[in-house]
Image (cartoon, helix red, strand yellow):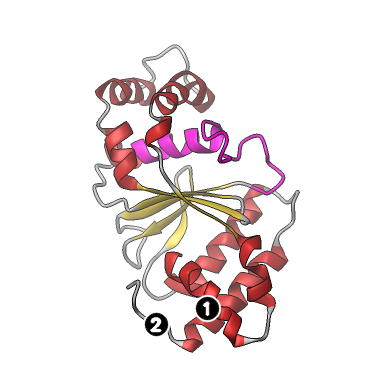
Amino acid sequence: YLGMKPERNNIEIFKKNLIRLLNSVDEIEREENQKNHIRDFLRDTFYRDTNEINTKDTIDLAIHLGSSNKDKVGVIIEAKRPSNKIEMITKENLNVKSLQELVLYYLRERIINNNLEIKNLIITNVYEWYIFDSILFEKNFAQNKELVKLFIDFEEKRLSGKDTSFFYTEIAYKFIEENIDNLQYTYFHINDYEVALRNTDNKDDTILISLYKLL
């Protein structure tokens, strides 16, 4: 796939929809609306006829491995609004609420639903994208017997705290911190592509091809 040359028409659709996404961003808009913008961009660019993409339970966005919401979830996305600096991860600080939420959603999908087909996990605020390979979550979280036991106890309400904030601060934080050096990710910022994106010179589209393929 890395060596394949995308069709011109697909790149044009990608550019049009990505520009539409960026033009729709409102820094203080509710996260529900930001999530919808991201869903529309991904669906209309890549997944409309092949993969269902929508909310699933408490997951902001799930890309299913087929055209139905009955198909297994392949990608889990946690979406934040750009102004939500406190909950959004940064390169300097991964162990914040957005990643803690992602761990909870992953464990629910992996342990409760016995989903062995999760491919990637993503945190984005539209501009910044952090993409994790599920292999890292499998190794560092799903295979951690102590974490899984606490997770199951939490889900079955056997612990002193019942709400998700308890899981984030008292459980997820500890295990993320212990594995922080193992959590590699792919990162990009949309602003790095904006000049080429809004330039009518097709020669500048070369820089967009890697981003197109990644997404």
**Side (left or right) of 89 relative to 85:** left
Q: Please name the residue shown 41% across and 58% down the image.
A: 63
Which amino acid type is shown beneath numbered disc 1? Thr
Q: What's the magenta region?
A: 81-107
Percent of width and height locating residue 117:
26, 52
**Which residue is located at x 44 percent, y 11 percent?**
160
- Residue 28, compared with residue 85, is above or below; it is below
- Dot 1: what SS? helix
Location of residue 70 with respect to 16 vertically, above or below:
above
Q: Amino acid at mark 2?
A: Lys
Q: Nearer the viewer, residue 201 or 32?
A: 201
Mark 2 highlights which residue? 5
Of 50 and 206, nearer the camera is 206
What x and y, as percent, mark residue 167? 46, 24
Of labels 1 and 2, earlier in sequence is 2
Image coordinates of residue 121 in percent, x first then y, are 41, 48
Name the foreground residue: 98 vs 94: 94
